[in-house]
Image (cartoon, rainbow, N blue to C red):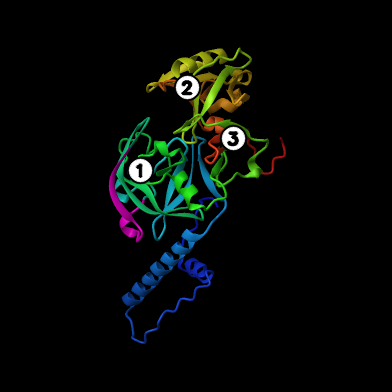
Amino acid sequence: MARGLKAFSILAVASAVTATANIIKVPVSRTPRTADANVAVVARLHDLMSVMVNAVALESSVGRQEVALENFHNAAYYGTIAIGTPPQEVWTMFDTGSSDLWVPTFSGAQGKETSYEFAESSTFVETNQPFKITYGDGTVLGKFGKDVLRVGELALANFTFARVNDTSGLSNQGVFPFDAVLGLGFPALSDSHGESFLEALKSSGKVDEVVFGFYLPKDEQGQLVLGGVDPDHIASDFHWVPVTRQMWWTVELEAASAGDKYPVRFSHDAIVDSGTTLIIGPSSEMFMLADLMGATKYPVGGTDLYIAYCSEVSSMSLSFKLGGKEFDLTGEELVVKNLSNGLCQLGINGANLGKQWILGDVFLRKYYTQFDYDQKRVGFALAKAAGDNFV
C-alpha cells in the first residue's frame, strides 16, 4: 500500500455493490445507440455505482485504519486522502499542530501534483465561509465547503474542509511533495464552523476508540494508525503524559538536559507536532542547551540552526523530562544532515516561540507516539521496525 488509497475502477465498484446484497435492475433498451451514447451510458452507470458504494461506505465501521506514509528525505511524512464523489485523491500531510483540512483546488494548486475540483463532485456543498490559516512561512486562503472525506476505508460524510485557491504565501510549498494538510489537533484550533476531524471521527462511531499513532522512521516509509496503534512498531510500554492545553497536543516539559549536565527547568510547555521536522525551542533556551552539548549556532532566515563536528557527535545527547520520565536522544539520533568539512547539522532549532517547545519528527522518529483524544493524553514508547525483536 505504497500510496494509500486504491483507485475506484468500474469493475471494483460493481464488485463492491454486489457485496451489499442489494439487487440492481437496469432496463435494457433495444434502440440502437451511437458510440457517443454508449459512452454516456457507461459514464452514467459509473456515477450511479459510485454513489451507491459511497452510501455503503458511509454506513460502515472500520474499527482501525492504517495509512502508509511516504518519507520525504526524513523532513516530512505524507499519505493520501480522497474527497468527493467520485473520490479525488490528494497527497496530504497529517498534522497534529493544526485542526483544519485544506486542499488546493485546481486553480490554486501552484503547480502541485494533486488537487480537488469541487465541480466534479456530486456530493459537494458550498458554505462560502472564508478560510485563512497562517503558518511560520506564510498564509493560505480559500473557502470552506462540505464533502465526503475518505482516509483509507474510513469515510466521513458532509465533512467541513477548506478548498484553497491561494497558497502563494507559503514559501516552502513547492519544496514538499504533499499538497494538502489534514489537522489532527483539538477543535479549539479550528477556524471551521463544522466539526474538526477528531470530533467527526468520534461522533461517527467508526473507530473503536478515538486514538491514533505515528511511526516515523528514518529513511523508510512511515505509518499512521487511526483508531489504535500498530504493535509491530512498538518496542516498550507506553508512558502516558496528560495534555495540559487542549489546542495543540501540549504536555508539560518538566526539564531538559544536555548530556550529563545538570537538568535545567525551561519553559513549561512542549507541543508534540507531527507537522514539524525539527525539535524547536525558544532561542535563548536552545542556545544554552546547544552550548552545553558543544554545538555552534548558525543563524539562517530569522532562526538558529546548530552544527557540530561529526567526529564529536557521539559524545552528545539531549534529554526531555515528560511525566516524570526522561526521553533521551543520542547525538547520532539528532543528526539530520552531513555537511561539508566534517560538519553535521543537528535536528534542533532556536526560534521566537515564546515560552514553549515543539517536539517534531526528530523526536517522534525514536518514540512511537500515541495521541489519545478520548482521555486527553499522549503516550510515548520506543519505536521499532517491523520484525525487530529488541525491547
Residue 264: image location, x then y, percent = 56, 14
Classify 193 as above or below 284. Answer: below
Bin the neighbour count of mark 3 within 10 Å (Cα to Cα): few under 14, some 14-19, many 20 and up: some
Give the residue at x 37% y 70%: 43
Give the residue at x 44% y 47%: 91
Front residue (pair 343, 145): 145
Q: Which badge, 2 or 1, comes first in the chain's sequence?
A: 1
Q: Circles 2 and 3: CB distance less than 8 Å?
A: no
Amino acid at dot 2: Gly
Q: Write down the quadrant of residue 232 in the picture.
A: top right
Q: Which residues are magenta?
A: 116-132
Q: Nearer the viewer, mark 2 or mark 3?
A: 3
Residue 286: image location, x then y, percent = 49, 18
Task: Name the residue beneath numbered marker 3.
Answer: 379
Residue 136: image location, x then y, percent = 38, 30
Amino acid at dot 1: Ser
Q: Does the magenta segment cover residue 83?
A: no
Element type at marker 3? strand
Indicate which disc residue 281 carries.
Answer: 2
Marks 2 and 1, how far apart at CA: 29 Å
Classify 145 as above or below 176. Answer: below
Q: Nearer the viewer, mark 2 or mark 1?
A: 1
Marks 2 and 3, how far apart at CA: 21 Å
Marks 1 and 3, how far apart at CA: 28 Å
State the quadrant of the C terminus. top right
Classify 79 as above or below 348. Answer: below
Front residue (pair 199, 94): 199
Give the residue at x 39% y 73%: 42
Q: Which badge, 1 or 3, comes first in the chain's sequence?
A: 1
Task: Name the residue beneath numbered marker 1.
Answer: 192
Q: Write down the quadrant of residue 363 in the picture.
A: top right
